[in-house]
Structure formats: C-alpha cells, structure tokens
Amino acid sequence: MAKKVFVSFDFDHDSGIKNFVMGQAKLPTSPFWGADWSMKEAAPQHRWEDEAEKRIKQCDIVIVMVGKQTHNAGGVLKEVEFARQHNKPIAQIIAYSDLVNPTPVANAGRLYRWSWDNLKALLN
C-alpha cells in the first residue's frame, strides 16, 4: 500500500521541485501518494502553521526536499518541528542531481539521493 507523504520544500527557492514530486506521485509505480497542500495565497502565520500541522498529522511520513537554501527555510523548519511533535518519520531527499554536499536540515533525519530505490526503501 502506498504511503501518504507530506512533501516539505523551500517555497521561496524550490517551488518547482514540488511539481516534480507531485508528478512522480501520480505514476502507477510510485510507492507514495500525496496531495498538493501548498497554500496558494499569503496567509497569516498562525493560520499557515495550523494548516501545516493538521496536514502533517494526517501523513505517514514527511519528506524534506533539500535544495541549496532549505536548511534556512523557516517553513521547512516549522514543518520538521511539527513532524517531530507528532512522531512522524522524516527523511531528507536531495532535490537536484547536480547538488553536491548540500547542508541538511537540522533534526530532519538522514540525507538520501533521489532515486526510486531509495524512496521505496524509505517507504516500506
């Protein structure tokens, strides 16, 4: 059974990666599924946090897509905090094949290269 995944990413620098991951989730061989839960409009901080926490609570795992600046992204750091509070597993996936030695997000688990094999192993 495919896992329900919350995808965390740096909205300011890596929003394109979210579209890629959501496209991958639609493939018949995908080991995961998820909904595009990015907030489309500006929202007050408390409203965004409430929605993010609610959505993370509904998922099986949080996957952090790591780009060059992800370790400094306030939204990602907050989502990781929510995942920890609700005992959700977290994994970090390097979002770009040409990204060498990215800085991992603090307290967000091990860093993996993007591959179907790594993803399937994480989601089993």
Image (cartoon, rainbow, N blue to C red):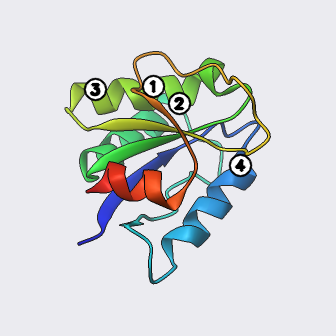
Q: Circle 1 — which element?
A: helix
Residue, disc 3? 84
The residues bearing labels 3 and 4 have C-alpha atoms spaced at a distance of 23 Å
> Which amino acid, by three-letter code, is at mark 3?
Arg
N-term mark: 2 or 3: 2
> Is there a contact, CB below 8 Å, between mark 1 and mark 4?
no
Does 116 sit left or right of 124 as displayed? Answer: right
> Is there a contact, CB below 8 Å, between mark 1 and mark 3?
no
> Which amino acid, by three-letter code, is at mark 2?
Val
Query: How many residues crowd around disc 2 within 10 Å: few (fewer than 14), some, or many (20 or more)?
Result: many
Q: Circle 2 — which element?
A: helix
Residue drawn 55% across the image and 30% down it: 75
Q: Circle 3 — which element?
A: helix
N-term mark: 3 or 4: 4
The residues bearing labels 1 and 4 have C-alpha atoms spaced at a distance of 17 Å
Residue 86 drawn above or below residue 37: above
Does 14 sit left or right of 92 as displayed? Answer: right
Quarter occupied by residue 47: top left
Q: Position of residue 78 (x, y in %)?
A: 45, 25
> Which amino acid, by three-letter code, is at mark 4?
Ser
Residue, disc 1? 78
Q: Position of residue 112 (x, y in %)?
A: 51, 38
The residues bearing labels 2 and 3 have C-alpha atoms spaced at a distance of 12 Å
Quarter occupied by residue 44: top right
N-term mark: 1 or 4: 4
